Image (tube, rainbow, N blue to C red):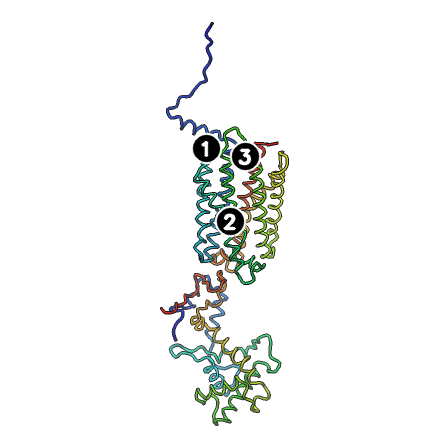
Amino acid sequence: MSKTVVARPKVVATPFPPLRQALEVRAHPSAAVVAARRLNRAAGLIAVSVLVDSAVEHYRGEFHNKAMFTPLVLGALSLLVSAHGHNDRRPARHGGRDAVYASAALAGVAGLGFHLYNVGKKPGGYSWQNLFYSAPLGAPLALVLSGAMGFLSECVRDTRPGDAPTIGGLSAGRVVGAATSVGLVGTTAEAGLLHFRGAFHDPFMYLPVTIPPLAAALIGNAAIRRTERRPLTKAFLRFTAALGFVGAGFHAYGVSRNMGGWRNWTQNLLNGPPIPAPPSFTGLALAGLAALGLMQDHPDD
Amino acid sequence: MTERYPGYDVQAKRWTPSWNEQTREVIDRRLSMDREPRYFTAHEWPTLEAVCARILPQPSDRPPVPLAAHVDRKMAEGRLDGYRYAQLPPQGVAWRRGLKALDAEAGTRRQRRYSELSAEDQDILLRRMQRGDLDGEAWEGMPCKLFFQHRVIPDITHAYYAHSVAWNEIGFGGPASPRGYVRMGLNRRDPWEAVEKKAGR
């Protein structure tokens, strides 16, 4: 019996195996990690919007209730852990990020409760007047969405390389896609209410009530239908993402058109259209694009 | 008079974003008004000044707001309210008739002009006017109560509270143009608004 020489796999000797592993993960992150990091970025962008918008608006409300600091704290934390997640290429959940994202989402739900209570106790209750001018019901939703997208990101990331990411037994792409669709509808409702209040005086004010709902319908449709290439959905999500940034620009222009212009910024930043609000559309669209990528990388049908 | 807004001077807003060039011009014009009559005659003038001094007595430690001159300019420039009680004649005519009637009432009762009466007697006549109890011939059928409520009181008080001295007293920010206000709720204060002294301090 002759001895067969089996060529042994070549092993690169490194003195520090964890480093090698880290380098490999860094060079070739799995599709799930790529998607998770996209969702981290989406959550982070929505968190920026929440942080700045709530800082400005709650300053206007003089932090009358100490709970009004909550979205500042959780928005900032959500932003921090999102940056951390963006820099993290390991395919595993992170307890700290998970905790922050979950708290942000819960705080958003609590904030919605506060805002509902605040509107309800005003004379006239849930009248159009109070919906327009009291605590906005849609704003805490953004904190919920930042937390939810981050939380979903952790679920997606927690996938063994090679496996299809799932959330609660469902395809992760479909879950994130559905969440994006719901989030876009809610954010559109908020923009619609406030742009109606502004009498759609600039024709561009129709854009956030036309493009994002179409994107919501398309990504919602993608989440429940057969997996296939969806260039139209992708295009509308990208359009929505661009709209978020363009919207901030339009809002800055709106501030300049208020009496006194930028010279009167202490008044007009508060009184004019909120500059930090539109980028939450961008955040949601990025989540939708991540969902689309997940669905196509891991078809479940 | 106790100050509710100690140290507050609305004029300090002059060069801040609160006021722009138009606002400064309007306020300058208002504050540089001379105190001589243009509409009313030299005969009517002391009566009008006396009425103003009783409706809105002013402290002696500052130059008084020229109320009579403000009322006079409103008549001279024909700045109307936009409405008028049908029982009252046009504003200038109403004032002329009312002042003449007050002098006539003072003459009937004290053989003096209204402006020469003691403050107490001036007040008695104003109160009777307020109740509608004056109906001498000089009124020519004009209801003195309506004249008091809708001519005397608004014209004089509006003149007073159009003046920056009055704004300092009540902590008002003036036209706030272009600044405006951001905290609209009751009992909420913008950072650039006057600070009210808390009770008991």
Q: Are marks 3 and 1 in contact (CB under 8 Å)?
A: no
Which one is earlier in the sequence, the residue at label 1 or at label 2? 1
Q: How much space separates mark 1 and mark 2, taking CA atoms?
A: 30 Å
The amino acid sitting under disc 3 is: Thr
Choose the circle earlier in sequence order: 2 or 3. 2
Residue in view at x 54 percent, y 44 percent: A282
Most extreme residue toward the front is: A169
Q: Chain of mark 1?
A: A
Residue in view at x 51 percent, y 34 percent: A34
For label 2, the crowd category at 10 Å Cα-Cα, with few meaning under 14, some 14 to 19 and many 20 or more, is some
* Measured Cα–Cα span from mark 3 to mark 1: 17 Å
Give the answer, above or below, for where B126 lies relative to A115: below
Q: Which residue is mark 1?
A: A90
| Secondary element at tag 2 | helix
Circles 2 and 3: CB atoms closer than 8 Å? no
Name the residue beneath numbered marker 2: A109
Q: Are marks 3 and 1 on the same chain?
A: yes
Looking at the rendered image, the disc whose residue lies closer to the viewer, 3 or 1, is 3
- Do marks 1 and 2 share a chain? yes
Q: Report which quarter residue A68 is drawn in.
A: bottom left
Tell me the subunit letter for badge 3.
A
Q: Does mark 3 fall on the same chain as mark 2?
A: yes
| Residue found farthest to the left | B201
Q: CA distance from mark 2 to mark 3?
A: 25 Å
Pointer 1 with pointer 2, Cβ within 8 A: no
- Badge 3 marks a residue whose secondary structure is strand
Residue at 44% from the left image edge and 52% from the top image edge: A69
Q: Is residue A96 above or below residue B131?
A: above
The disc at residue A166 is 3
| Chain-order first, disc 3 or disc 1 | 1
